[in-house]
Amino acid sequence: MTQLEKARKKKITKEILAVARNESLSPEEVRVRMEQGKIVIPFNKNHSPKRICGIGEGLRTKVNANIGTSLGSKSLKVELKKLKICEDSGADTIMDLSTGGNLELIRETILSKSVLPVGSVPIYEAVITAIKKKGHISKMTEDDMFSTFESHAKDGVDFATIHSGLTLEVVKRMRQEGRYIDIVSRGGAFLAEWMILNKKDNPFYTGFDKILKIARKYDVTLSLGDGMRPGSVGDATDRSQIQELIILGELAKEALDYGVQVMIEGPGHVPINQIPTNIMLQKRLCHNAPFYVLGPLVTDIAPGYDHITSAIGGAIAASHGADFLCYVTPSEHLRLPTCSDVKEGVFASRIAAHSADIAKGIKGSIEKDIAMSKARKRRDWKEQGRLCIDPEKFKLIKKKTALKNDFCSMCGVYCSLKVMDNLSPFAPALPAGREDHGQRP
Amino acid sequence: MTQLEKARKKKITKEILAVARNESLSPEEVRVRMEQGKIVIPFNKNHSPKRICGIGEGLRTKVNANIGTSLGSKSLKVELKKLKICEDSGADTIMDLSTGGNLELIRETILSKSVLPVGSVPIYEAVITAIKKKGHISKMTEDDMFSTFESHAKDGVDFATIHSGLTLEVVKRMRQEGRYIDIVSRGGAFLAEWMILNKKDNPFYTGFDKILKIARKYDVTLSLGDGMRPGSVGDATDRSQIQELIILGELAKEALDYGVQVMIEGPGHVPINQIPTNIMLQKRLCHNAPFYVLGPLVTDIAPGYDHITSAIGGAIAASHGADFLCYVTPSEHLRLPTCSDVKEGVFASRIAAHSADIAKGIKGSIEKDIAMSKARKRRDWKEQGRLCIDPEKFKLIKKKTALKNDFCSMCGVYCSLKVMDNLSPFAPALPAGREDHGQRP
């Protein structure tokens, strides 16, 4: 039985218990929302991640970090270092998006090391293997695609991106309408190429029942991919993007009925004013399945700062109901992220997630800010360092600006907090009564 | 005559012409909005900044960068270096917030060098001089306050923060309600101290007519300061903050009637979901005067990353109508910003401003993103480097990851853009007609 099937039988699993504890909710609340498809817990028994993570309605907004090799950077060692950085800096899940080197070995090693739930995108390996062994992506068979997914599932992948909504119809709609940038999703582009060259529809759509069987067998959470994710703010919320979302909504319902946990992936490059609409649409069309967004990036012109363009979009998306933020690093659009990019990306995304959780009213969120504010008022630097999101960076900056007093080097003795402290004893000296405040002549 | 008085007499000044040209608006549109108090052009003839900057409704969102010495860091040279960084990285205005060293000399030098409009907060100098010469802030006379403002105005300051709305009544309301952090505005704390110790109301309120006379004489744009700016997300939008805003609205009307340009300063630390309300309230209570926000910072727990917490808040604020963003650097709450902090702060703020301008539909905004997207689709790296917000950083990252091909090191040959390019000739091979898209069994 999958977790979802157990939840339907009113069973409180140890995964549900862990999520309930982490989120200060009752186990029954978590169970009911899982049953309704509003919460997923990516947890494949063949991996059994130590840090169990619930994603969805009423839970803290979660952060995913992508790692993985590329053709130009095949070092497993570097990727394991990135994994450690993700774990240490507070990512909730990671995805292995490797495309260079021994993909199976990399995945198995990452799975064996990761305390976080691990996601993957099986189509990458299916395509790369087909190109290697058969010479061209078009030679990839439908069975290659399904069996690659099964091998990932068997290895213990906790969630997997499957681009089931990218049908020929969707690609046609895109071409009819026109886009500044056609398809920026790597999996989406692969599938479009395969479909067009083979004049066949997307096997992940036509054979979605096979996907469901594999997912149920290994209890893999499906993350239905958005191949039509806009790659330019000028393409956002167009007909092909929404067409794909409609199809994803239909497939999500099938998955749920089949006992498979499912979430929906979303944009992409989206102008600020279109983000609330995107969230509302996803939640409605997909019956409140958890929404997993990449960014959204609110402008295209800031390569080198895309952790910031995404933090802006992610914070807005999550405050309107997105549940899961895929981090974006400063090196997006430029290169494979370095270790330092990974760290910057995780923290920017966590800031977006936490800020949104304050807005969402998630338990235990604003309480952290209030504790920090109290420590700040007291100029209790030790406590601030303990409470802040990145204690390491805090200490580094503080160390560089050797603090001789309890105030910082910006205002020095003119610290507003100190001024106000000095005033406390004078509170009673304030003029009493309601009418005696100053009047201008 | 001030610019505002000239605008009332239907005169199209060279400053209005410059703003109209910069913003692709007609000079008459700019003039009318200036007359209505919806646009300000900080421009003091004694400074005559080369880069003329309009702030307000329908204009690009502008970015201010604070520079200035502190007691622990008095080097004018360093501050001039920061000034240069601000100019080069695209700040629209700067404020000299110096509190260490020879304040007059620093201000005069910055004014003589800056091609950008320069703002100041005269209360800092008034207080520091009173402490130096008379031993205590409480010894500062009302005349000290006004004459300091006059000396700034005479020196050529284009805009000045005056905390006229922080009355004893407002301070009383704050104490009645309680706050996690009382007053974090430095000027606000000074004035509260002065008022409470002297049992007198705020001279900038009771003597607002004197402020107006000076502002009109030198045509200084007033930036009415928010002494009650919340310093904790838990304090945002409380009664004292809104009380002060009501008073600022009244004073803004007086300034406008008197022929003085005026804008309103705003929060501060504000949860995401309260930002739209803050903008709406300010615009309504202050009759659409330009709104100049500090941040807003959407969480308190991210010292070291407050350029990001502020970019999130600033983007949301501006997309809802805020006109002018005061940058916040990564070192906020920790130390006086370094040169590198200043640069990071300006770019984060510019990203927020530009993203908001896309949402606001400001002319020439999304066009930049579309041009970038087209270059990205073509993998035209030279053009991307030219179009991006920080060409220097772009080049640096690209240089480090020596590009041998036209695709980046993230996807390598599996670049989705390349895949889609390769597919272009196959477009006609798509099945035609409306009914033949794939059907699942």
Image (tube, coloured by chain):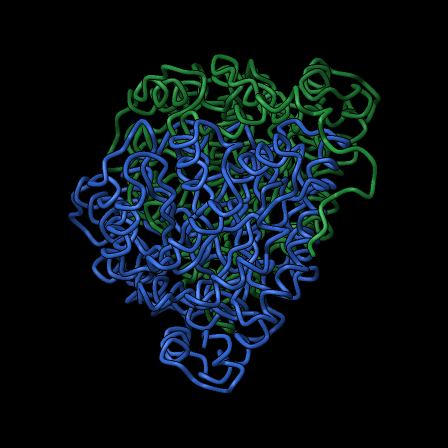
Chain colours: A blue, B green
Q: What's the residue at 58%, 65% (across, down)?
A: A255
Look at the picture and state if B239 lies above or below A9. Answer: above
Residue B268 locus on image (x, y percent): 50, 51
Residue depicted at 59% across the width and 75% down the height: A36
User: What x and y, as percent, mark residue A401?
Assistant: 20, 41
Asked where in the image residue B7 lies, by quadrant, the reply is: top right
The N terminus of chain B - image quarter: top right
Residue A137, horizontal then vertical, whole percent: 50, 32
Report the side of A72 relative to B389 (left or right).
left
Looking at the rendered image, the quarter that the C terminus of chain B falls into is: bottom right
User: Can residue B207 be seen here?
Assistant: yes
Question: Which quadrant would residue B73 be assigned to in this image?
Answer: top left
Q: Position of residue B351 (x, y in %)?
A: 52, 34
* Above or below A114: residue A9: below
Q: Nearer the viewer, residue A258 or A398?
A: A258
Inspect this view and state whether residue B2 appears: no
Q: Taking A71 as reference, is A29 above or below it?
A: below
Choose between A240 and A331: the one closer to the eye.
A240
